[in-house]
Image (spheres, grey):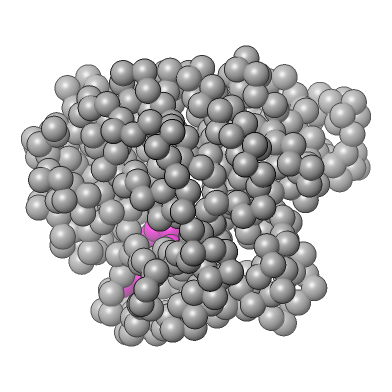
């Protein structure tokens, strides 16, 4: 088993890794910026090392400083969490050269799935259905126009190296393609250091459904059901996720799970990962992308399967075989996660910063909170605005919905503005309560209810 793990991240996910390490008798090392000195993850770890000033570039994305922290701490492994270095092949390679284990997939798998064009090729080769579109990188907006004329509008322009909803634009006709191409490309270059673009047919009003997979170093791989992630904001960022997709036929679940495993196998995948699909009204599914890391929404999968994904990641990285087989995976109940953020929905979701003066989290049966916040904690302008993940579980979706509504009304934060009132309104809509929504639901709801959004 691993002896000491450095957590190359911050916030609630760093806390999650640290707690899993403690449960398994593994020492933990936190890294922190000067702005994060009082963050919870630095307070609960066995050791903590400052890696720079407040900004991400000076600290959590400072490759030299993070690697140095791993070396001087004596860590034998690094867990990247999500975001930051979690999908950076060069980070995994650098750790490998230092004799430190990267808790994640092999470098080749990160490279194969981190590039959306190569990922699509891998999906096609594995026999997985894909959305019609370009065969690879689109060279120019003129080539994009030609492809769009062939497959028909609407289309999506997507950054090859994209993630988090950035570098994506919907194009409804040829008159707007050139300008949206420039906008998406510029955003991709600024966000990912690459302006390369793909083009895909836009599947109108689909569901966003993802399959959780995990594989070991001994040729074993399983899928752990699916998550429904269609409630997304105007920037394609997820707001509410649930497991399972309550209306998915069992046969489609099996086919999607098997397709996800085949895609992962095609790039020699190991450890935890997620294969994402678009699902239309007929339950036809299409490969979207693969995330070569743990997802923000992994807790809902843990709640319905009883599997601790974080501990499994640590065990797989240490060389252990998966302790469960596909036949052992059972889905029990229904779980929903709501992302609590320091944002003002009435001001186009502008970030809110300052000291949290009150923090009254909900409690009771079937409620889980993953957070790094507390009364007195200062929210910095440097980082992602997520404050917490509120996870509820019920015997079925109806009970989980009622439990989430109750928990959101109990949740109280003062000193900063949060999206909690916004989530209360969203979760009171008849469509959401009935499960009658798609990836375009939130923008449509906001347009129809500007005062309430």
269 within the magenta span: no
Residue at point 33% right, 53% down?
Answer: 13
Quarter occupied by residue 381: bottom left
Q: Is residue 339 visible?
A: no
Residue visible at 59% across and 27% down in the picture: 259
Q: Residue at x 22, y 58 (%)?
A: 41
The C terminus, quarter of image: bottom right
Residue lying furthest top: 125
> Residue 250: x percent and y percent?
62, 41
> Which residue occupies the foreground of this view, 410 or 52?
410
At horizontal 67% and vertical 44% (from top left) the residue drawn is: 249
Where in the figure is residue 29, as x and y percent of width and height? 15, 47
Chief secondary structure of the magenta portion: loop
Magenta stretch, residue numbers: 378-387
- Left or right of 389 in this view: 76: left
Residue 22 horizontal/vertical position (percent): 14, 51
From the top left corner, tell me how far across and down residue 181 is, in percent.
75, 38
On the image, which quarter does residue 222 sit in?
A: top left
In front of the other: 219 or 414? 219
């Amino acid at each position: 088993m691993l002896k000491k793990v450095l957590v190359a991240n911050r916030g609630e996910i760093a806390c999650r890794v640290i707690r899993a390490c403690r449960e398994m008798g593994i020492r933990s090392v936190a890294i922190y910026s000067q702005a994060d000195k009082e963050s919870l993850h630095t307070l609960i770890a066995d050791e903590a090392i400052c890696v720079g000033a407040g900004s991400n570039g000076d600290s959590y994305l400072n490759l030299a400083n993070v690697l140095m922290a791993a070396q001087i701490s004596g860590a034998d492994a690094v867990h990247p969490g999500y975001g930051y270095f979690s999908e950076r092949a060069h980070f995994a390679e650098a750790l490998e050269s230092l004799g430190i284990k990267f808790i994640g997939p092999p470098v080749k798998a990160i490279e194969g799935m981190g590039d959306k064009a190569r990922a699509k090729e891998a999906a096609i080769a594995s026999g997985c259905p894909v959305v019609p579109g370009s065969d690879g990188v689109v060279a120019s907006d003129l080539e994009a126009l030609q492809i769009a004329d062939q497959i028909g509008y609407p289309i999506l322009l997507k950054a090859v190296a994209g993630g988090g909803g950035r570098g994506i634009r919907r194009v409804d006709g040829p008159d707007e393609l050139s300008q949206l191409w420039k906008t998406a490309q510029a955003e991709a270059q600024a966000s990912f250091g690459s302006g390369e673009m793909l083009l895909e047919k836009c599947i109108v009003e689909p569901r966003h459904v993802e399959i959780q997979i995990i594989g070991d170093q001994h040729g074993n791989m399983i899928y752990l059901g699916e998550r429904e992630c269609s409630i997304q904001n105007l920037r394609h960022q997820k707001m509410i996720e649930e497991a399972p997709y309550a209306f998915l036929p069992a046969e489609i679940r099996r086919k999607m799970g098997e397709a996800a495993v085949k895609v992962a196998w095609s790039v020699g995948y190991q450890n935890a990962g997620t294969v994402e699909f678009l699902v239309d009204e007929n339950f036809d599914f299409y490969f979207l992308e693969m995330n070569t890391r743990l997802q923000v929404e992994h807790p809902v999968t843990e709640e319905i399967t009883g599997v601790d994904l974080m501990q499994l990641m640590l065990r797989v990285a240490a060389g252990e075989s998966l302790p469960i087989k596909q036949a052992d995976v059972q889905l029990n109940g229904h779980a929903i996660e709501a992302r609590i953020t320091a944002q003002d929905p009435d001001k186009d979701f502008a970030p809110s910063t300052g000291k949290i003066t009150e923090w009254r989290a909900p409690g009771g049966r079937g409620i889980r909170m993953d957070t790094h916040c507390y009364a007195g904690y200062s929210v910095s302008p440097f980082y992602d605005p997520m404050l917490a993940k509120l996870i509820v579980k019920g015997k079925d979706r109806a009970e989980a919905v009622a439990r989430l509504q109750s928990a959101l009304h109990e949740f109280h934060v003062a000193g900063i503005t949060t999206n909690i009132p916004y989530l209360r309104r969203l979760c009171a809509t008849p469509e959401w309560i009935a499960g009658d929504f798609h990836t375009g639901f939130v923008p449509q709801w906001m347009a129809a209810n500007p005062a309430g959004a």
